Amino acid sequence: MTISSTFLLPMKYLFFFFVAFFFSAALMPIARRAGLVLGALDIPDTGRHRHKRPTVRFGGAGIFLSFFLCTLLFCRPLGKTAAALLLGGGIIFLCGVLDDTRGLSPPAKLIFQLIAALAALPVLGIPAEFSLLSFSLPLPPLLGYGYGIYRFLLYMNGVNFTDGIDGLCASSSIVALFAFGAVFFYHGMSDAGILAFLLLFCLLGFLPFNLSPASLFMGDSGAQLLGFSLAVFAMTPIGGRLCTEFSFFLALPAIDTFVSVGRRILQGKSPFRADRGHLHHLLLRAGLSPKRACKILVFFSMGAAAVGLLLLLPPA
């Protein structure tokens, strides 16, 4: 199978993807009104929240509902990947809604994240080995569980960290989802490829509302859902192994997490305490505008994803 013929495969699913896009875009005004009613408002301040006006942070509801319904419509029967996404994704979406509307403490959010990861892992399958390029290391079940939970926590929190300037979290996630979908279709995993592109097009329906100056934020309900979903895709076996090369698709949230958490620990602060020390904050302090900072980090994500694609899409 050649690469050119492989990338023609998603064309027959374009109807599904455009339905996801239009459904998501249509739900965003409803999500904004619901956020106003529920009090899911992000109020500007002199700290981390420096947007100019109060903004609803409930776009994640539109993303989740459009993805959930399109998955049920177009992915029947549900495979393991879809079941893990809907089961664990529903749990982490509930966590995000509670945080957006009522506020949750970091320990409470961590408990929700652990529950979502533990619900999804048996469905996906416990990682049996750690692999990087040509190196592989078998993992006993207990270590496999631990490694799987680590991956979920890393990407859920890492993607949430990138949700700090208009358009960044959605745009960088779109890059990652495109790369995942391309790999899945190339390797004949059309079910997982459809799911990745469905979520991508749901994000495209949200993105116009989130570009600077944003009229709608995705909130924790969207950012944690994206992190969970990307972790599921990152743990999809290809050729019987877990591809750590997938981490290239998620380089931005992974690096941001390691840098931010490591810095907080070295400074004697709680690793769970939010601050203005993320990569996008550093670019803003260097004098870049939010739009330019977003573009730089998205281009970085595209470059890292291109490296991952080169590793995972060898010439036929």
Image: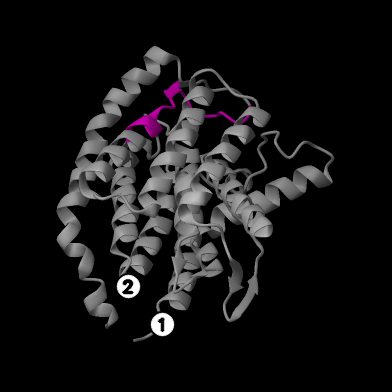
Residue 113 as seen in the image, left or right of residue 310: right
Q: Quadrant of residue 188?
A: bottom left
Which residue has dot 1 on it? 314
Q: Is residue 50 magenta?
A: yes
Task: Give amino acid for label 1.
Answer: Pro
Stretch in magenta: 47-62
* x and y percentages locating residue 246 in the rendered image: 50, 65
- Residue at figure coordinates x 47%, y 54% from the top left: 124
Residue 222 visible in the snapshot:
yes
User: 236 or 213, which is in the foreground?
Assistant: 236
Q: Quadrant of the C terminus?
A: bottom left
User: 150 or 105, which is in the foreground?
Assistant: 150
Q: Is residue 58 magenta?
A: yes
Q: Where residue 186 is drawn, which disc sits there?
A: 2
Q: Where residue 298 is drawn, which disc sits there?
A: none
- Label 1: element kind: loop
Q: Are marks 2 and 1 in contact (CB under 8 Å)?
A: no
Q: Quadrant of the N terminus?
A: bottom left
